[in-house]
Amino acid sequence: MSTKQERAVELKQRTGDAHYNCCQAVACVFSEETGINEETLKKIGAGFGLGMGCMEATCGALCGAQMILGLMKYQGKPIRQNAAELHKKFTEKCGASICKELKGAGSGKILCSCDDCVRNAVSIIEEIL
């Protein structure tokens, strides 16, 4: 496991006011590479945790990874191929990309823990970049 993966999980596991959602945890460990301070990345990612707050949408960790991909790869031309690759690899590693499916809401079968979604998202971004 990389240092970034460990750091992202540590951020995700914080409690109280120091808590980071899955999106924030993934995005913030790339602060140095993006040149965007951690507080700004945390604000940008605030609405993406828990499948955009309702578990019905894309996993926050994947959203954070896609944001970092855009910040690091976009140079005026579409990055659809990279975005599709990221989504595919995340889905392969985690078993789904929708929060409620990952968490087993309704099915009772957890496909991937939040910590592992965060680890996998960071790992895939490190691989792509």
Image: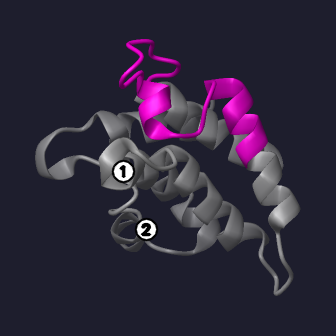
Task: Identify the residue at horizontal 76%, vertical 36% (top origin).
Answer: 89
Viewer can see residue 1:
no
31 displayed left or right of 82? left
> Where residue 44 sits: x, y (%)?
41, 71
Residue segment shown in magenta: 87-113
Task: Identify the residue at horizontal 17%, vertical 38% (top origin).
Answer: 15
Q: Residue furthest front?
A: 106
> Where residue 69 sits: x, y (%)?
70, 62
Residue 106 covered by magenta stretch: yes
Give me the C-alpha separation between circle 1 and circle 2.
Answer: 13 Å
Residue 102 covered by magenta stretch: yes
How crowded pointer 2 is (Cα within 10 Å; few <14, some 14-19, many 20+) is rated as many
Res 49 label: 1
Q: Which numbered disc flags the more N-terminal residue, 1 or 2?
A: 2
Viewer can see residue 6:
yes
Q: Secondary structure at mark 2?
A: helix
Image quadrant assignment for residue 46: bottom left
How crowded pointer 1 is (Cα within 10 Å; few <14, some 14-19, many 20+) is rated as many
Q: In the picture shown, does residue 18 fall above or below 109?
A: below
> Where residue 29 sits: x, y (%)?
51, 52
Q: In the picture shown, does residue 67 fall above or below 110?
A: below
Q: Residue furthest left?
A: 16
Task: Identify the residue at horizontal 44%, vertical 23% (top origin).
Answer: 113
Res 41 label: 2
Image quadrant assignment for residue 110: top left
Q: In the picture shown, does residue 23 fall above or below 117?
A: below
Q: How is the image coloured?
A: one colour
**In the depicted view, which residue is nearer to us: 78 or 55?**
55
Image quadrant assignment for residue 91: top right
Q: Three-letter amino acid code at disc 1?
A: Gly
Res 31 label: none
